[in-house]
Image: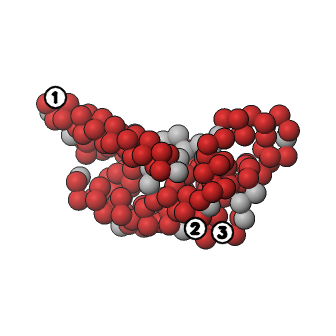
Amino acid sequence: MFRFLADNLLKLAVLLSAFYGVLWFMKTLGATLQGVFSIIVETTSAWTVFLLFAFSESFLGIMPPDLFIIWAKEWGEKVQTNPWLLVVFLATLSYFGGWVSYGIGTRIYKIPRMRTWAQKKYSKLLNDLKKWGGFFVVLSALLPVPFSIVMMVCGITGYPFKWAAYLSLFRYLRFFVYAYFLFKII
């Protein structure tokens, strides 16, 4: 468990370093993060962004939610909507995306070949989930740990859906805390 946590904290440090490196590079070129997101806001419909985010949160969490939180601030300002309402909507999409991932996990468990693959691929994660249970779900909801994969593994291992759903509510806390800091930065 602690090894998994250390690995993911290292990944977070690398990701933050890369993020700040990109910001520094953009600044040297005269571009700003706000300018980049302004272009995205101008050229992409909100529903496209919401669908992309819902898909990402339901299937392996491919895209970091932080980008969508930044988008919510820019888009909210563009259409004169409170960006915090958009953050609530994004957090809700993420929360229900976890439910979808859990459902996928329960379906995977019913297919023998897929069950064998998942047990092989995520054996460490399966063991950690069995050992740490709810604490692991809370960590995945709060930290930049792949939330949808953890929820999928919950479905594969038969972790009680009721507890996974309750503990996944910490996902809202993550979105609000991250939004608070990201809104201060941009």
Whether residues under marks 2 and 3 lie with C-beta atoms below 8 angstroms apart, the answer is yes
Amino acid of disc 1: Leu
Which residue does the numbered mark 2 point to in the structure image? Answer: 167
Secondary element type, mark 1: helix
Q: Is residue 184 left or right of residue 168?
A: left
Classify mark 1: residues with Cα within 10 Å, few (<14), some (14-19) or many (20+): few
Residue at point 85%, 46% (across, down) = 110
Residue at label 1?
29
Residue 20 in view in this figure: yes
Residue type at numbered disc 3: Trp
Percent x, y of residue 112? 86, 38
The residue that appears at 60% across and 51% down in the rendered structure is: 128
Instruction: Give whichever of 6, 110 is nearer the camera.
Output: 6
Say whether marks 3 and 1 touch (CB < 8 Å). Answer: no
Give x and y (percent) for residue 81.
Answer: 37, 65
Mark 3 or 1: in front is 3
Crowdedness near tag 3: few (<14), some (14–19) or many (≥20) residues, C-alpha within 10 Å: few
On screen, 96 above or below 24? below
Determine the CA span between mark 3 and mark 1: 48 Å
On the rendered structure, is 94 left or right of 10?
right
Task: Report the disc number at residue 163.
Answer: 3
**Cα–Cα gap, marks 2 and 3:** 6 Å
Q: Nearer the viewer, mark 2 or mark 1?
A: 2
Provide the secondary structure element on which disc 3 rests: helix
Residue 76 found in image quarter? bottom left
Residue nearest the viewer, comparing 89 with 125? 125
Callout 2–callout 1 Cβ contact below 8 Å: no
Q: Residues within 10 Å of mark 2 (few under 14, many from 20)?
A: some
Q: Is residue 171 above or below residue 28?
A: below
